[in-house]
């Protein structure tokens, strides 16, 4: 029996104390609706801006790696990767939430909301 993937929607792998999350389906079309390519660079921008606003300490534990058709997050901290996977899982398969996240976080001129 196949075990469920606790890191959905990412694939998880480890090598010599470095853990990696790789996103297989980049949801190109969802980004194209906002005049982005939907490539690895756009996912990097979305995740980096989201973490800048929601959890900057977590961002400091990660290395974001991109290519045109690939998005990967690496870290020595497996729990940090699990936390990011849970954040992305909440909006990844919900078209309306994904659209809202792209509108909010896939911006070159992103300004994080400040908590008063």
Image (cartoon, rainbow, N blue to C red):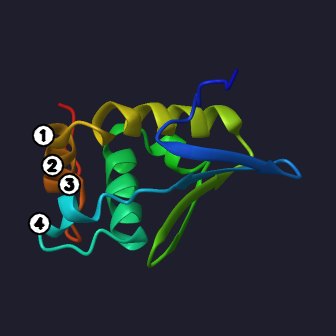
User: Which numbered disc flags the more N-terminal residue, 1 or 3?
Assistant: 1
In the rendered image, is residue 110 in sight? no
Q: Are marks 3 and 2 in contact (CB under 8 Å)?
A: yes
Residue 20 visible in rendering? yes
Q: Residues within 10 Å of mark 2 (few under 14, many from 20)?
A: some
Instruction: Give the residue pinned by disc 3.
Output: 102
How far apart in space, not on screen, are marks 1 and 4 (Cα)?
13 Å
- The vertical placement of 64 against 77, above or below, is below
Which label number is shown at residue 34?
Answer: 4
At x 50%, y 36%, the residue is 8
Residue placed furthest toward the right? 16
Question: Would you say 65 lies left or right of 56 here?
Answer: right
Asked which secondary structure carries label 1, the reply is helix
Q: Position of residue 35 (x, y in %)?
A: 13, 74
SS at badge 2:
helix
Position of residue 68 relative to residue 73, above or below, is below
Q: Which residue is mark 1?
A: 96
The one of 63 and 5 positioned closer to us in this rendering: 5
Between residue 69 and residue 97, name the one nearer to us.
69
The residue positioned 32% from the left and 41% from the top of the image is 92
Callout 3: helix, strand or loop?
Answer: helix
Left-right relation of 8 to 46: right
Location of mark 2 (residue): 99
Instruction: Please state which of residues 26 and 56 is positioned toward the viewer in this rendering.
Output: 26
């Amino acid at each position: 029996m196949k075990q469920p993937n606790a890191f959905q929607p990412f694939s998880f792998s480890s090598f010599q104390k470095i853990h990696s999350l790789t996103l297989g389906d980049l949801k190109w079309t969802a980004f194209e609706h906002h005049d982005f390519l939907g490539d690895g660079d756009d996912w990097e921008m979305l995740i980096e801006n989201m973490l800048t606003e929601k959890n900057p300490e977590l961002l400091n534990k990660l290395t974001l790696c991109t290519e045109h058709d690939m998005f990967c997050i690496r870290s020595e901290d497996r729990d940090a990767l699990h936390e990011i996977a849970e954040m992305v899982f909440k909006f990844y398969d919900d078209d309306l939430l994904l659209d809202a996240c792209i509108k909010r976080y896939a911006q070159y001129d992103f300004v994080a909301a400040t908590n008063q």
